Image: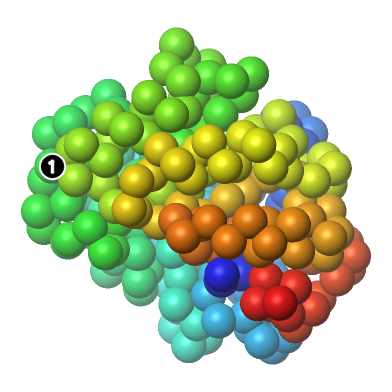
């Protein structure tokens, strides 16, 4: 199972939100490249970069920071936030992203999803399913829809999506651990695809618990606040996931 240290960009800084609340953000590094370099120097093999400004506005805002990160570091970067058109996806890939992450636009705009998958292949396209209160959150986590996570994943898989990011927004930034039963249900819905989990990781025991599940579809974990607050480092997290 792979570790994906997170670099969430808001207002030009690397931040973490609390339960997806833009009004409850904590700045951990004034320079996203500095944050990304810290994870790389600790041994990170992948990075998860999210343009929070873009997620809220609907168009990418921080491509310049993505370009700086991918130009300075050799770590593959997956990038999401505001990718709601084929042009936006092209721009993100052109700025050095190894993979792109579509949000709820993948559900609301089937033509966009079809075009992006056809142009870039399922290997380079992830879809993020973010859940608040048991329902899929939309518009950069600012609204809740009527669709459940399992139904959303099944619908997306039928449309050709093979790689997913699942975030429990209610747990995000809380450092209280994942809901393991929920993770089992979500992984089961993926049915042959790959899932990255995000939300609530607070200690190494949380990573060890996910690794012990031995769920074939659970391929990685995204960690942000726990790393920033030095509850453990990248090497320790990698070891916990591979135990």
Left or right, residue 153 beside residue 61: left
Quarter of the view holding residue 8: bottom right
Which quarter of the rendered picture does the N terminus lie within? bottom right
- What residue sits right under mark 1 in the picture? 114
Which quarter of the rendered picture does the C terminus lie within? bottom right
Work out whether residue 111 or residue 146 is closer to the camera in this orientation and state it. Answer: 146
- Residue density around tag 1, few if under 14, some if 14–19, many if 20 or more, within 10 Å: some
- Give the percent coordinates (x, y) of residue 20: 67, 33
| Residue depicted at 53% across the width and 75% down the height | 46
- Give the percent coordinates (x, y) of residue 98: 35, 71
Quarter of the view holding residue 158: top left
**Colour convention of the picture:** rainbow
| Residue depicted at 22% across the width and 58% down the height | 122
Count of labels in the image: 1
Quarter of the view holding residue 132: top right
Work out whether residue 32 or residue 20 is closer to the camera in this orientation and state it. Answer: 20
Q: Is residue 64 above or below residue 71?
A: above
Answer whether residue 119 is visible to the viewer in this image. Answer: yes
Left or right, residue 35 beside residue 55: right
Answer whether residue 101 is visible to the viewer in this image. Answer: no
| Residue depicted at 66% across the width and 87% down the height | 43
Q: Secondary structure at mark 1?
A: helix
Left or right, residue 230 beside residue 193: right
| Residue depicted at 46% across the width and 14% down the height | 145
- Give the percent coordinates (x, y) of residue 168: 63, 36
Left or right, residue 229 beside residue 113: right
Q: Residue furthest top?
A: 146
Work out whether residue 41 or residue 124 is closer to the camera in this orientation and state it. Answer: 124
């Amino acid at each position: 199972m792979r570790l994906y240290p997170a670099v969430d960009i808001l207002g030009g800084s690397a931040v973490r939100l609390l339960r997806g609340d833009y009004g409850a953000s904590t700045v951990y590094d004034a320079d996203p490249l500095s944050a990304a370099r810290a994870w790389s120097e600790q041994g990170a093999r992948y990075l998860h970069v999210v343009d929070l400004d873009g997620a809220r506005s609907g168009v990418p805002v921080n491509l310049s920071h993505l370009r700086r990160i991918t130009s300075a570091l050799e770590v593959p970067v997956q990038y999401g936030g505001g990718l709601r058109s084929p042009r936006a996806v092209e721009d993100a890939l052109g700025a050095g992203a190894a993979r792109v992450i579509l949000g709820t636009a993948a559900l609301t705009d089937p033509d966009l999803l079809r075009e992006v998958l056809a142009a870039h292949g399922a290997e380079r396209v992830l879809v993020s399913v973010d859940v608040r209160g048991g329902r899929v959150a939309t518009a950069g986590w600012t609204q809740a829809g009527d669709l459940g996570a399992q139904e959303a994943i099944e619908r997306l898989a039928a449309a050709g999506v093979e790689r997913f990011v699942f975030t429990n927004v209610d747990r995000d930034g809380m450092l209280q651990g994942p809901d393991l039963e929920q993770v089992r249900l979500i992984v089961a819905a993926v049915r042959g695809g790959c899932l990255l989990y995000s939300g609530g990781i607070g200690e190494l025991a949380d990573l060890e618990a996910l690794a012990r599940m031995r769920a074939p579809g659970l391929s990685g974990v995204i960690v942000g606040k726990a790393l920033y607050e030095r509850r453990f480092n990248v090497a320790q997290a990698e070891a916990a996931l591979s135990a």
